[in-house]
Amino acid sequence: MKHLGKFFKKYPVIPEIRDMGHLNKAMDSKAVAVFLLTGSILEFDAVMTLAHEKDKLLFINVDLVSGIEKNGKGIEYLIENDICDGIITTQSNLINIAKEADLMTIQRVFIQDNSTLKEALNLLKTTNPDAVEISPAIAETKAVEHLKKLNLPIIVGSFDKEKETVKKLIERGILAISSSEQRLWG
């Protein structure tokens, strides 16, 4: 994802689709990528076709969607059927499998305190994903300086609905902000 940095500089918000009814709005946005956090395997082929028609990268959160096994076979299915450009997951074994198959990978980490920050840093050193997504967004205040040392692009899952917050995060060196807040997709 480092090579996508210049595209995210132009438009740093990544729409998160939590309701398939919002898919077209996300695809019509200026976004470089779309995160799919809902839906089932029966819909993915059509979503991927639409994403590529709209010149978007499609990342599927394999932890949240239906019909994909949370193992190597599920990742193989995504690859063999060209269903996404990359995956988002908390599971390091899936990151490793996807990387071996040249899918882009985003490791999602939840940081609540110093001990979960330390665990995340150790995990990211071993998985070395293409990017890391921090949740909750409030965690970025302390974690970002530590994560920057790993030289990984950082995405923040945002619950903040203000464009000013997005601007401040980008100024701090965040690659992008993922959000289901449609006002930010504009």
Image: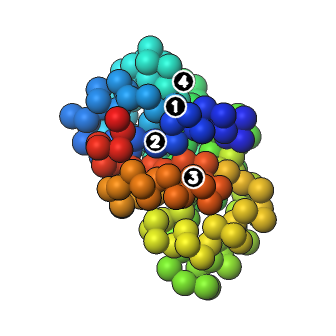
Q: Secondary structure at mark 2?
A: strand
Q: Identify the residue at image location x=46%, y=65%.
A: 137
Q: Secondary structure at mark 1?
A: loop
State the image coordinates of residue 77 (x, y, percent, origin top left).
53, 33
Under mark 1, the amino acid is: Val
State the image coordinates of residue 149 (x, y, percent, origin top left).
78, 65
Q: Earlier along the polypeptide chain: callout 2 or callout 1?
A: 2
Q: Left of 131 or right of it: where is 160? A: left
Under mark 4, the amino acid is: Asp
Q: Earlier along the polypeptide chain: callout 3 or callout 1?
A: 1
Q: Which residue is mark 4?
A: 82
Q: Earlier along the polypeptide chain: callout 4 or callout 3?
A: 4
Q: CA distance from mark 2 to mark 4?
A: 21 Å
Q: CA distance from mark 2 to mark 1?
A: 7 Å
Q: Identify the residue at image location x=60%, y=39%.
A: 9
Q: Earlier along the polypeptide chain: callout 3 or callout 2?
A: 2
Q: Identify the residue at image location x=60%, y=55%.
A: 171
Q: Indicate which label's residue lies in the foreground, 2 or 4.
A: 2
Q: Which mark is residue 170?
A: 3
Q: Contact, CB < 8 Å: mark 3 with mark 2?
A: no
Q: Which residue is mark 1?
A: 32
